[in-house]
Amino acid sequence: MFSVNENDVQFLIDSAGQNVLINDKEMKAIITNPLSVVLNEYEQRYIHSVQPIIQGYLVTVNNEKYLVVTESLTKRTTKYKSLMRHCNYTLEMKGETKKVIKRDENGNPVLDKFGDPVYITIQEESVFVPAIVDNKSFSVNLNAQMIIPQNQITVVVQDNTVNRDRFKMNNVFSFVEKNHKVFNRDFTKRGLMILTCESTT
């Protein structure tokens, strides 16, 4: 019986794979389409690699962002295989406004006539977050999704410290010209943060 070893798979990936970014680090991988002949509203792809591709990893393929939505803890024969779903939106999280001490060109604090520091208000830079946004509950099994109330959306982002800070409970962000407030955060799928948000007036 023909057997494939890891060196053969690595050679195949090196010769037939494409360059992708995984959490902003370049590597080679093979990207394939799911076997289903049914078209659905999500673009999903399989990613194959000899290195682990963990649920929640952010993958960039041809300048498009995908989130890995399945666990792949063990190799399938000699490689890892994970399902990833296209991030259909990039959310802009406005930077916080805060007061800081004004400084001169040498970095020294600027003082008023009483010797007290002068404060200025600055706007921190916006953070752009690739996300899967939908009006249904999140599920890898597309037949198991449920429609959620009309004023709500489900937002799936990579679980990391920046996103946990930006998407705190009751934080408000803009999405398709409406403000939405985070009212539930679900961490049951390791590597993913699944948010339930509702539109606000």
Image (cartoon, rainbow, N blue to C red):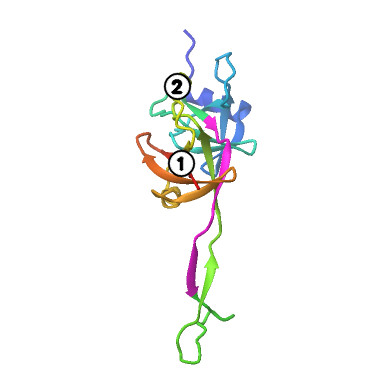
Q: Amino acid at mark 1?
A: Glu
Q: Farthest residue to the front: give it.
A: 201
Residue sitting at x 55%, y 26%: 44
Q: Residue at x 48, y 71 (%)?
A: 99
Disc on res. 198: 1
Instruction: Give the spatial CA distance, label 1 vs label 2.
Output: 24 Å
Q: Residue furthest bottom?
A: 113
The percent position of residue 134, horizontal first and vertical second, equals: 51, 33
* Amino acid at dot 2: Asn
> How would you rate the neighbour count of disc 2 (Cα within 10 Å): few for under 14, some for 14-19, many for 20 or more?
few
- Report the span colored magenta: 85-100
- Tell me the element at label 1: strand
- Can you identify the residue that label 2 sits on? 141
Pointer 1 or 2: first along the chain: 2
Q: Are marks 1 and 2 in contact (CB under 8 Å)?
A: no
Give yes or no for residue 46 being in the magenta stretch: no
Q: Residues within 10 Å of mark 1 (few under 14, many from 20)?
A: many
Instruction: Work out whether residue 117 or residue 76 is closer to the camera in this orientation and state it.
Output: 117
* On screen, residue 159 above or below 36: below
**Residue sitting nearer the eye, 52 or 35:** 35
With 132 as the anchor, is 184 left or right in this view? left
Queried whether the magenta region covers residue 95, the answer comes back as yes
Q: What percent of the width, then of the height, locates residue 117?
A: 47, 83
Q: How would you classify the magenta stretch by its main secondary structure?
A: strand
In the rendered image, residue 28, in percent from the top left (x then y), is placed at: 57, 34
Judging from the image, what secondary structure is the residue with disc 2 in? loop
Is 75 in front, or is 144? 144
The image quadrant of residue 27 is top right
